[in-house]
Image (cartoon, rainbow, N blue to C red):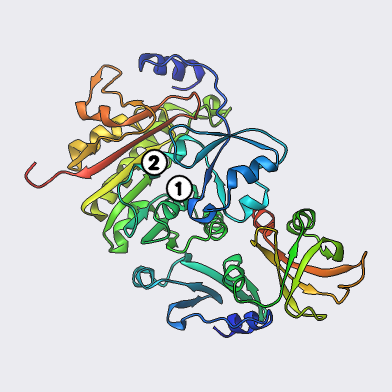
């Protein structure tokens, strides 16, 4: 549970998951409803709502977990259509593509990246250039385009 | 026994005249995720022409498109899935899926597993199996992309599913099959009748195992994308004679199942199966089965 709560706090949010229903297997975390928990054997490959994994001491969130964070995280940016597309193609975010900034946006802060429809596209790290055009404002850490990149 | 002429001649004997077809690409809206998001309008705004599939609640054919429908933000956010039109039918044949314990016995790459979860509105439990460990990662990716919450996946052969010691109210057997020419341009040069018979034998083993796991009053949906009757009507005829199963009437797109195959008469109830010859869709076969009552 600790990697999940620590990660959530970096967005200015407090993650409140019932530890009874969070299952850890091989440093991967899953959220299981009570019914699923009852039928899940130890040798599962995947179960319930995948939350993320710890690798070399670093927590890598799933998109499910980012969606859990989205309503509670303080730090968010909303992108225009073009910047949203570039972000899911793996690109960093420039100031001019940001429509709205919410929460703390200090250098090094994590921030969720949302599109104009309020859907979470991933997250990034604030680089500290939020007032300067032509410079990267938020460095892409994880975006939903990862689903395509990880399969090929 | 193989080659285009051999198989085309078989189809003619079964009452279908061969013609080349090019099934249209199709998508299925993930209703739970896409609710209130005006998804068809959003996709049309991206330059994707959509046409509603008249016989599917959530299916659309993709026409001209300026973007790849497998690489839009909407796809990556799990608002829709790319799923062949006929392949969208089997999961819709079950009655009352919500809250049920469901076995998806040959699940990878997971299109139908996601569809089941969507039809269940993530209420209930899906146990998804696949024997091919390499394909489990693709299945897991699909489940994460579509925000499925109610599924557990095991790397397990469907022929060992009774080892789970669970009883299932609904069982989907989208069994490994020989495929069909509409989905694979090289099909005629790849497949032989021996392949078909080998697959049919495995399918019978999977059917027999599924019956062991079926809860009282439970339903099995059996489907293949094969046009070969050994994998379709002949297997179902065998199942009703040997596994005390009966075929349920289903209301979906497709022709009635064949009741006479190469001169052999099958049980008349096999007509309740649905056979889809390639046309607007690829070739497909589906039916719904239940256990016979003890008194029958």
Name the residue rendered at 29%, 58% in the picture: B162
Which residue sits furthest left?
Answer: B295
Q: Position of residue B158 (x, y in %)?
A: 37, 52
Q: Chain of mark 2?
A: B
Which mark is first along the chain, 1 or 2? 2
Q: Which residue is mark 2?
A: B90
Question: Residue B219 bears which disc, if any?
Answer: none
Q: Which residue is mark 1?
A: B112
Q: Position of residue B17 (x, y in %)?
A: 44, 14
> Which sits in the foreground, B233 or A133?
A133
Q: Quadrant of residue A86?
A: bottom right
Check contact, mark 2 vs mark 1: CB within 8 A.
Answer: yes
Q: Is residue A152 visible?
A: no
Q: Chain of mark 1?
A: B
List x then y, in percent, for residue B214: 25, 53
A68 is higher (above) or lower (below) than B122? below
Q: State the residue in front, B275 or B240.
A: B275
Q: CA distance from mark 2 to mark 1?
A: 8 Å
Q: Quadrant of residue B193?
A: top left
The one of B205 and B52 positioned closer to us in this rendering: B52
What is the secondary structure assignment of the residue under circle 2? helix
In the rendered view, tell whether residue B23 sits above or below residue B116.
above
């Amino acid at each position: 549970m600790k990697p999940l709560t620590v990660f959530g706090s970096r967005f200015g949010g407090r993650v409140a998951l019932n530890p009874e229903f969070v299952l850890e297997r091989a440093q991967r975390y899953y959220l299981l409803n009570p019914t699923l928990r009852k039928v899940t054997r130890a040798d599962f490959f995947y179960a319930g709502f995948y939350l993320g994994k710890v690798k070399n001491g670093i927590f890598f969130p799933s998109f499910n977990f980012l969606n859990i964070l989205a309503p509670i995280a303080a730090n968010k940016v909303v992108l225009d259509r073009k910047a949203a597309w570039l972000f899911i193609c793996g690109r960093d975010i420039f100031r001019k593509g940001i429509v709205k900034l919410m929460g703390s946006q200090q250098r090094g802060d994590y921030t969720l990246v949302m599109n104009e429809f309020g859907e979470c596209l991933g997250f990034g790290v604030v680089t500290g250039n939020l007032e300067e055009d032509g410079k990267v404002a938020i460095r892409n850490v994880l975006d939903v385009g990862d689903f395509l990149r990880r399969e090929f | 026994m193989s080659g285009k002429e051999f198989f085309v001649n078989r189809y003619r004997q079964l009452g279908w005249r061969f013609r080349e077809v090019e099934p249209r690409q199709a998508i299925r809206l993930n209703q739970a995720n896409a609710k209130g998001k005006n998804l068809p309008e959003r996709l049309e705004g991206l330059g994707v022409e959509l046409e509603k599939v008249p016989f599917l609640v959530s299916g659309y054919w993709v026409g001209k498109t300026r973007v790849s429908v497998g690489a839009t933000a909407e796809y990556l956010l799990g608002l829709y899935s790319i799923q062949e039109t006929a392949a969208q039918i089997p999961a819709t044949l079950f009655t009352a899926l919500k809250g049920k314990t469901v076995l998806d016995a040959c699940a990878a790459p997971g299109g139908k597993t996601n569809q089941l979860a969507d039809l269940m509105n993530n209420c209930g439990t899906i146990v998804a199996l696949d024997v091919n460990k390499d394909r489990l990662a693709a299945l897991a990716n699909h489940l994460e992309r579509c925000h499925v919450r109610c599924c557990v996946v095991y790397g397990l052969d469907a022929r060992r599913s009774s080892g789970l010691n669970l009883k299932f109210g609904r069982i989907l057997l989208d069994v490994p099959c020989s495929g069909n020419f509409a989905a694979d341009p090289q099909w005629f040069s790849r497949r032989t009748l021996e392949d078909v018979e080998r697959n049919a034998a495995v399918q019978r083993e999977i059917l027999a195992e599924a019956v062991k796991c079926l809860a009282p009053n439970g339903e099995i949906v059996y489907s293949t994308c094969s046009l070969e009757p050994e994998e379709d009507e002949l297997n179902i005829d065998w199942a009703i004679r040997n596994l005390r199963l009966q075929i349920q009437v289903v209301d979906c797109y497709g022709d009635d199942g064949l009741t006479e195959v190469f001169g052999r008469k099958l049980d008349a109830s096999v007509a309740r199966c649905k056979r889809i010859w390639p046309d607007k869709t690829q070739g497909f076969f589906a039916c719904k089965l239940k256990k016979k009552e003890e008194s029958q």
